[in-house]
Image (cartoon, rainbow, N blue to C red):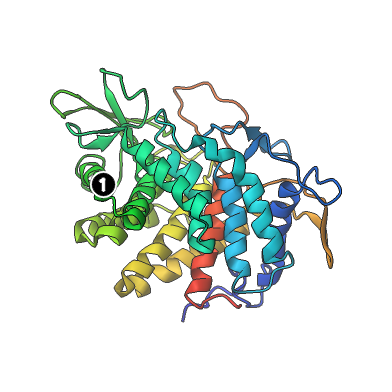
């Protein structure tokens, strides 16, 4: 019953149609492998000095960020996700090589593990070192995640009952929390389980509870940014930074909210978190256009700007929900598959030029697999070409993660 829409199939569902499963899988692999091995000399990949973040629509190559940027964990994370897939099915690049590439790309990022000046350590550390620890049991990776969780916990405020998003931990002014911060709680929960550190899980649950109570509107939509008074804990402002307006719903923020609440439910089994995720997911799905790919903001005038990253985050989040609450399989499994199908159909970039055996990429072309991402289109800001119609490293990351979830459910051909 789940293998519908044969004309546009998800990766590796092995149905007939323009998006033949193995062809799409190889195209994704070619993009990531081509970027990962760029500059390879005598079989050795050089130590990275920059990490892919976005490809503007008028270019082909990634713009790279320094090791301290919030997005740095996603590219090594995609390599870990391909490694995870290679343990179940045969890819054109071996598990051994994917493991080596993932560790090469993540190694310089370990220096971020003790930072207390950012709330994004889950993205930066857990999305790569966390996979290393989970998939290989590597002790150094495991300790790295715990160190990062300890550092993140320093940004928690017992009055606001949240983790600060922006600013220094010593700031005494407005205490700012963005919905994105829900995505960093998984690292706290995992580290708490691994090391028996209940302080970390208590902080995560406190933040999730406060976010549930304050960031969500009655219809299941979300505000992007909240300010708190550090003396009273009261909310003093609700607004957007990357969405259309303070009263609108930024699509990727809504995606972070859905996925983050599912994660909180996974670790606590608090049904209030699950109910919140479901209401937010229903809002997101109800707001999709006919072609199934979200616009960058649900309430903005239709401008043609999409955000494929919001769609892939929700696809993975819905499959995560089905994993944790199987009673919702009939409601959400096909919708997640549809999001994957529709996103690939509308936004697949031109394929790289590669040979199949031995696997080699001669021309990556547009470096990201997906196009039509939007970082930011807030009309109050001055935007660059990077802001919209881009390829986003995290859009590809969550697409691959979603596909791996389907593989784990037995719905992708091994």
In the rendered image, residue 411, in percent from the top left (x then y), is placed at: 52, 76
Looking at the image, residue 10 lies above or below residue 59: below
In the rendered image, residue 328, in percent from the top left (x then y), is placed at: 32, 71
**Residue at the spot of label 1:** 208
User: Residue at left 26%, top 21%?
Assistant: 174
Split into 4 quadrants, where in the image is the C terminus? Answer: bottom right
Q: Residue furthest bottom?
A: 1
**What SS does tag 1 mark?**
helix
In the rendered image, residue 349, in percent from the top left (x then y), is placed at: 69, 51
User: Residue at left 67%, top 38%?
Assistant: 57
Q: Is residue 151 left or right of residue 109?
A: left
In the rendered image, residue 266, in percent from the top left (x then y), is placed at: 31, 61
Q: Is residue 377 left or right of residue 180?
A: right
Q: Is residue 137 left or right of residue 159?
A: right
Q: Is residue 330 left or right of residue 202?
A: right
Quarter of the image holding residue 48? top right
Q: Residues within 10 Å of mark 1 (few under 14, many from 20)?
A: many
Q: Nearer the viewer, residue 399 or 199?
A: 199
Q: Residue furthest front?
A: 139
User: Residue at left 52%, top 45%?
Assistant: 307
Q: Is residue 88 visible?
A: yes
Q: Nearer the viewer, residue 289 or 37?
A: 37
Q: Nearer the viewer, residue 410 or 286?
A: 410
Q: Is residue 225 visible?
A: no
How many marks do you count on the picture? 1
Looking at the image, residue 127 lies above or below residue 177: below
């Amino acid at each position: 019953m789940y293998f519908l829409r044969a004309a546009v199939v998800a990766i590796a569902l092995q149905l007939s149609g323009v998006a033949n499963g193995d062809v799409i899988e190889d195209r994704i692999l070619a993009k990531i492998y081509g970027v990962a091995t760029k500059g390879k000399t005598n079989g050795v990949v050089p130590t990275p000095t920059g990490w892919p973040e976005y490809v503007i629509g008028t270019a082909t190559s990634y713009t790279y960020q320094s090791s301290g940027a919030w997005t740095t964990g996603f590219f090594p994370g995609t390599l870990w996700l391909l490694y995870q897939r290679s343990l179940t099915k045969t890819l054109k690049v071996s598990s051994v090589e994917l493991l080596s590439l993932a560790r090469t790309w993540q190694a310089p990022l370990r220096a971020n593990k003790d930072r207390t000046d950012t709330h994004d350590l889950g993205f930066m550390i857990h999305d790569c070192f966390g996979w290393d620890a989970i998939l290989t049991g590597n002790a150094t990776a495991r300790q790295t995640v715990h160190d990062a969780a300890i550092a993140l916990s320093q940004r928690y405020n017992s009055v606001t009952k949240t983790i600060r998003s922006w600013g220094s931990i010593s700031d005494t002014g407005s205490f700012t929390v963005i919905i994105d911060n829900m995505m960093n709680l998984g690292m706290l929960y995992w580290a708490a389980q691994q090391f028996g550190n209940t302080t970390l899980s208590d902080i995560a649950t406190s933040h999730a509870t406060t976010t549930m109570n304050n960031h969500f509107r009655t219809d299941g939509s979300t505000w992007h940014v909240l300010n708190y008074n550090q003396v009273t804990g009261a909310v003093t402002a609700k607004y957007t930074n990357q969405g259309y307006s303070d009263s609108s719903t930024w699509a990727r923020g809504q995606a972070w909210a859905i996925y983050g609440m599912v994660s909180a439910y996974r670790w606590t089994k608090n049904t209030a978190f699950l109910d919140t995720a479901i209401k937010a997911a229903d809002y997101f799905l109800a707001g999709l256009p006919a072609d199934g790919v979200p616009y960058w903001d649900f309430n903005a005038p239709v401008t043609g700007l999409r955000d494929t990253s919001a769609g892939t985050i929700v696809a993975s989040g819905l499959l995560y929900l089905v994993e944790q609450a199987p009673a919702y399989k009939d409601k959400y499994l096909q919708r997640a598959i549809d999001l994957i199908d529709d996103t690939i159909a509308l936004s697949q970039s031109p394929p790289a030029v590669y040979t199949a055996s031995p696997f080699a990429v001669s021309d990556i072309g547009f470096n990201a697999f997906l196009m039509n991402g939007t970082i930011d289109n807030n009309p109050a800001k001055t935007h660059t070409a990077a802001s919209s119609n881009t390829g986003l490293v995290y859009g590809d990351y969550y697409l691959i993660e979603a596909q791996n979830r389907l593989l784990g459910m037995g719905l992708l051909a091994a």
